[in-house]
Amino acid sequence: MTLTDLAPPRVRDSWSALPADQQPPWPDPAAVQRVQAALSAAPALVDVPACDALREQLAAVARGEAFLLQGGDCAEVLDPQAPRRAVSTARLLRRMANVLEDAWTLPVVTVGRLAGQYAKPRSSAVEQRGAQVLPVYRGDAVNGAAFTAAARVADPRRLMEVYRASAATLAAVRRAGVGPVFASHEALLLPYESGLTRFDGVGGVPYDLSGHMVWVGERTRRLDGAHVEFAARIGNPVAVKLGPSVGADEAVALVERLDPQRLPGRVTLIARMGAGRVRDRLPELVERVRASGAGVVWVCDPMHGNTVQGAGGRKTRWVDRIREEVCGFFEVHRALGTHAGGVHLELTGAEVTECVGGRERPVAEGALGVRYESACDPRLNARQAVELVQDIAGLAGSWLPSALPGAG
Ligand code: PEP
Ligand code: CO
């Protein structure tokens, strides 16, 4: 008997009976099942020991002994240059990590939004241009970005392409020897995640071997939903995005669902409140989660609560607002004596013009069109990203728990 046999079939797809938000309208559900079966038979993309190693490093973050730097594209795209771009993103993350490590003498755990970040939750199922209404673009894992009826059909063969592209990306990052960069993405498309889940972990605990860490997004974190159930079942370190509408009871319940055993490093909470709300909304959540006895990692995503319409109707973010949310996040943790555990950023190694601002060579709002390449949300370019971590490095000193007066 193998460990696989020990995992009750109920556990394998316990999520499938529950409501799953944000799933594409696949025209041929049988074809999706075939892709899921093919993924089940394909080599896993990452291995269990690496997932466990990340969980142990995140446990150090939860104890206040390390910092998490997570970042990358909002949405990866299927194109032959993707692995090269991911290597550049991974290099940028390491460069940023070095800035923080030098300033703080604290290890920085780097986790990319890469090798799997191909699916997007959307606020509307359709997109209208003029008189024409088409299904919305849901990321290259699902359909094409072009505004044509043909491109917007959800095509499950894309899931296989995402798998191959992710394997190529992981191989390229390893080959480039940039240093330890783990892979993470939003676990949005359950047939993909489930297809890459393997039941041969220690004690039969399933692991989603599509990436080291996966997260549940702000739009799919309902407690009775399929995404939370899936995340609760796997052995990987998992994260959940928390927007301004989350209640403290809900946050505590999510942690309880995802980590009933209080395994250190198991749960990361990614707060994305917006610069104007982080100081109001975050303290209660942090206090209530702490009171529940859970030792989670708290991370600040200063991107998704600060998206605005810029000139020409393009989505953008102001670097000043991004920095302001990070400052608020650090202030809240300093006031409570808890650890500001990390940041989660959308960024790219390329010199794009998607976010407004910056110190040296700032991007003007009127210049957003010069090099706006994101398939979804606006990313910090390399210069803006490095400047941001320089500012974050400057926030250090009094905030480290070990630097608090009286701490032994
Ligand atoms: C994202 O991380 O790209 C995203 C969609 O975030 P959120 O779930 O926080 O809206
Ligand atoms: Co995004």
Image (cartoon, grey):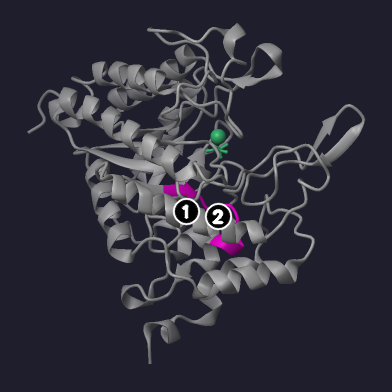
Q: Is residue 359 left or right of residue 132?
A: left
Q: Quadrant of residue 365?
A: top right
Query: Which quarter of the rendered picture does the N terminus lie within?
Result: bottom left
Q: Is mark 2 within 8 Å of ligand 1?
A: no
Residue 114 is at least partly visible in this image: yes
Q: Residue at x 29, y 44 (%)?
A: 176
Q: Position of residue 304 (x, y in %)?
A: 54, 29
Could you tell me the amino acid type at mark 2?
Answer: Val
Residue pointed to by mark 2: 162
Could you tell me the amino acid type at mark 1?
Answer: Ser
Question: In the displayed structure, would residue 202 be above or below residue 279?
Answer: below
Residue most toward the left?
408
Which contiguous range is marked in magenta?
184-192
Q: How many marks?
A: 2
Q: Residue at x 45, y 52 (%)?
A: 214
Q: Quadrant of residue 325?
A: top left
Residue pointed to by mark 1: 166
Q: Position of residue 330 (x, y in %)?
A: 33, 23
Q: Quadrant of ligand 1?
A: top right
